[in-house]
Image (spheres, coloured by chain):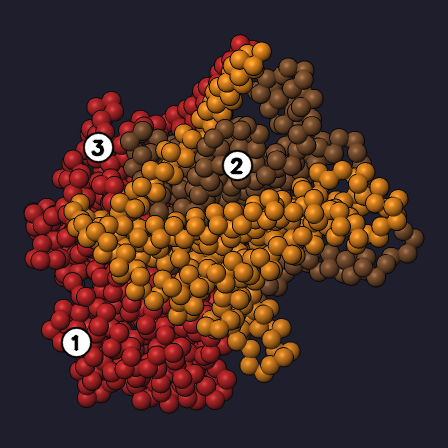
Chain colours: A red, B brown, C orange
Amino acid sequence: MKMRKTILSALLSAALLLSITACGSGDSGNAANSGDTSQETGTSKAGGTTKLTMWHIQTQENVAEIINASMKRFAKDNPGFEMEAIPMQNDPYKTKLITAMSANQLPDVFIHWTGGPMISYIESDAVYDITDYMNKDSYKDQFLDAAIKQATYKDKIWAVPVENVSPALMFYNKKLFADNGLEVPKTLDEFEKTSDTLVQKGIIPVALANKTKWPGSIVYGYVLDRIAGPTAFADANNGVTGFDTPDFLAAAQKMSDWAKKGYFGKDYNGIDYDAGQDRQLFYNGKAAMYIMGGWFLFTAKGENPDFVKDVGVMQFPANPDSKGKSSEYIGTMGDNFYSVSKNSKNPEMAFKAITYLLDDQAVKERVPAGKIPPLKAITLTDDISKIISDSASSATSMQLWLDQYLAPNDAELHKDQLQKLLAGTITPEQYNKSMADGVKGK
Amino acid sequence: MARKKKFSFAAIVAIIFAVIWMLVATFPFLFMAFTSFKQRNELFQSPTIFSLPKSLYLDNYKEILTGNFLIYFRNSVLVCAIGLILLLAASAMASYVFSRLKFKINKIVFAIVIACMAIPIHATLIPVFLLTKEVQLYDNIIGLLGPYIAFNIPVSVFILTGFMKGIPVELEQAADVDGAGKVRTFLEIILPLSMPGLATLAIYNGINMWNEFVYAFVLTSSVKSRTLPLAIWEYQGQYGIDIPMVMTILTLSALPMIIAFVVFQEKLIKGMMAGAVKG
Amino acid sequence: MEVKRQSLESVRRRSTAIVATLFLLPVAFFLIVYIFRSVIYTFKLSTLDWNGVSQSSINIGLGNWKTLIHDATFFTTIKNNIIMVIACLVIQMPIALVLAYLLDWANSRFKFLKSVYFLPLLMSSVALGFLFKQLFDSNYGLAGALMKIFTDSPFNLLANEKTAIWAVIGVISWQFIPFYMIYYFAGLTSISPELFEAAVIDGAKHHQYIFRISLPILSDTIKAATIMCIVGSLKYFDLIYVMTEGGPSGTTELMATYMYKNAFTQMKMGYGSTIAAAMFIIITTISLFTFKMMNMKEEN
């Protein structure tokens, strides 16, 4: 009997504890709690207001604020609707996105990077077709054509290109070049000569953070473009040609040669982008050139403002008498594309909310923050944005980052094998063979 | 320990080892703390990132303490405290059963609990996410308690059962003669004697919960329900990290744990030694 | 008389069963809701060809398992995990034991040491990842500077296919030694000090006391630590993912990182789940086997 009493009291105290728990959380989120207990996905009505949700990855406070301001304007102009914009960190975002998709619990609006993953989402019936909305009042015409093209699949538009036109650019240390009597290389031959000189002087020609893998893919993308032309990669991926043509071999060979000759220094496969190790080499004059997305200039402005004036921008060297031109770029017309999810109950309003991310006020705020939208009519005020935007608008072609262009599975193969190629553990032939055998395409 | 007048050779080796390990253990922490006193551009402008900060630059701390940090902090404290109490209570009860009660399937049940250690955490993401949505605990810190408790139970039960087995049975038999029931034996004899084990577990699981990232990320979304490990986002952008800011947050996140450890651990160990001062 | 005792016995047994059931309820609740369901779910997914996103998936039965058996990468990851286990057993556990004795010995005089030694376990993986990447950098890092003493061409230990796993093991050991240290230390403090005094009175030297008296008492603690070491190393994920992401060229890939990449990066949820399920089987088998072995020794 006694024992039962004790158990009972134990259970009671446990229950008490749980209720305390409940209280604790109650006060932890009263303010925003109308949506708290309801499903984030789909929509919820609270007090006559339909609440929608948007996931984005602009976690920095200033940019997140711009987005919040846009959503406030949306709510003001559309009584009865509200859009909660939730910022998340880039890397784990992909994990969360897949978790939410597999549970069929996407928010009304989410961002992605187009390319292979977008096609997977579309094929999996997760994305809402917004072609009609985009065509209405010729809304899509204000975007750069290449940006719309990037959001198009099977002749339908699936996403709104919102921010970050980012071509990969080739940066060089002007002072270092001048001190060593070097000229900006215009062709691949000149680049090799310049690099040989730099290696002799003990300077790393190109800082490459290939532990992170995708920086190597950018360089490879350029080399391949200059040798094989702007459509070579897409053709191979779509099965028109293959990944083992002589052009592909020449590109892989060149990458392997450059690595062997020390153009990327020694430990490039251990240099980490996220820890800023590549930039450290470039900032401190240990490396003379750097191939990176245009955003590097904004990063440098934050990390090492004095250094920015020494940074020159050049085009990736040309390869005369070949299929590729120096006006062709690797990069993206916007690396945050906003899509409406298929299970949104209010796709039209969700789309409308996205348009507020690019209304006049938003554009005015975005440009100084370095978030350049891919719009045709845009006035840029600072030098950095101009450099980036000019490169993008003068580009005769813009090949999407190879690792985003490929299907997710193929992208990992490409990056892993390329890292091995640069490490010298596989030959160019083996690299091409593994791509030819492994890439399933779209 | 008996005090000797002369240090033996072994003692000297031990002291050298102690000092070396002290350096090895503190260096990263000092690095983190020092970096938090730097400005973003100072980090990359100085010849090496290991150099000392130029001055005691406190703006990082000011900026973070005036931001959302305190919300995250409160959430972390709540999750940690409630999670630990529930976890330790549940584990202690189960461990008592495994270490003391004799019934047929005892060993099998114990093996099943231990086998639960083997599940990789990422394999549980989707089912737990779905469940949390279904019971409407998504984006609510209570939703974190379930996985935090569940995934720490196997190790805790394992450690505690071992600990309780080490407690001499004679003590209980004495109590049994008194006619104390099993529940009272548990509450009055086993639990107090398990304090060293419970303390170790509190520390270990406390740290786990405090630093847990994956579930905090997947099961919460808005600022009001985020925990400390998610606080670094605001300074970790798409293309680059504001490293000194991140280090400031990490230092601030680690400090409460260090303080808790120093206070808690000293008190508990003292308590459990119950006057029997060594040496 | 005889009958009465029997019924007393059965009453006692029933009360034991009631207490056991009630006391196990909370743990059972959490494990069933969060872990059993996940295990079942994982095994279910392992039979699917599914990208994790699509609302439709194809049941391919044991197809994924057949792929897994022929997947050379998976076997490399098992090998790497086993290296991790061994390293944990021969590096972490002995050092932790020595430190625990050191703390026990120094406890009254240098209390702060305990807190200092404990610091590594408190550091977040993000900070550690950043720091150690910088430390291993051959241009600026400490490791580079140290290597210069021995060789003209220092290299990045994390970037080298032969050394990467050892570099990572070094960092992981550094982070987890404090855990085992505290665990042993807790074991040591529960040894009654009278035992030591009695030994000293009997004329035992300090090392004799350690090897003859306190280590045998600690043996249960050490056994438990061994199991945790094995399980922990077999499902390790954190710092490897932060520092190397399994690279260079897959030389530090572990079962957990491989599973994660398949399921969430390459969008092969079905295959990723198969790896997870295989991990579950492997880890359970190894840990229960070790557990059995240890207890068998004890019984003999």
Residue C21 placed where, x, y %?
Answer: 46, 24
Q: Amino acid at mark 2?
A: Val
Quadrant of the rendered image containing residue C62: bottom left
Q: Nearer the viewer, residue C37 or A381?
A: C37
Q: Nearer the viewer, residue C42 or B146?
A: C42
The residue sitting at 65% across, 27% down in the picture is B192
Query: Badge 1 local density, few (<14 within 10 Å), some, or many (20+)?
Result: many
Residue C206 placed where, x, y %?
Answer: 82, 52
* In-image side of A227 versus C78 (left or right): left
* In-image side of A407 versus B164 (left or right): left
Disc 3 and disc 2: Cα gap in Å? 42 Å
The residue sitting at 53% across, 40% down in the picture is B158
**Dot 3: what SS?**
loop
Q: Amino acid at mark 1?
A: Gly
Disc 1 and disc 3: Cα gap in Å? 46 Å
For label 3, the residue is: A43
Determine which of the numbered discs, if any, sits on residue C217 in the image: none
Query: Badge 2 local density, few (<14 within 10 Å), some, or many (20+)?
Result: many
Q: Nearer the viewer, residue A396 or B185?
A: B185
Determine which of the numbered discs, if any, sits on residue B157 in the image: 2
Q: Nearer the viewer, mark 1 or mark 3?
A: 1
Residue furthest to the front in view is: C2
For label 1, the residue is: A242
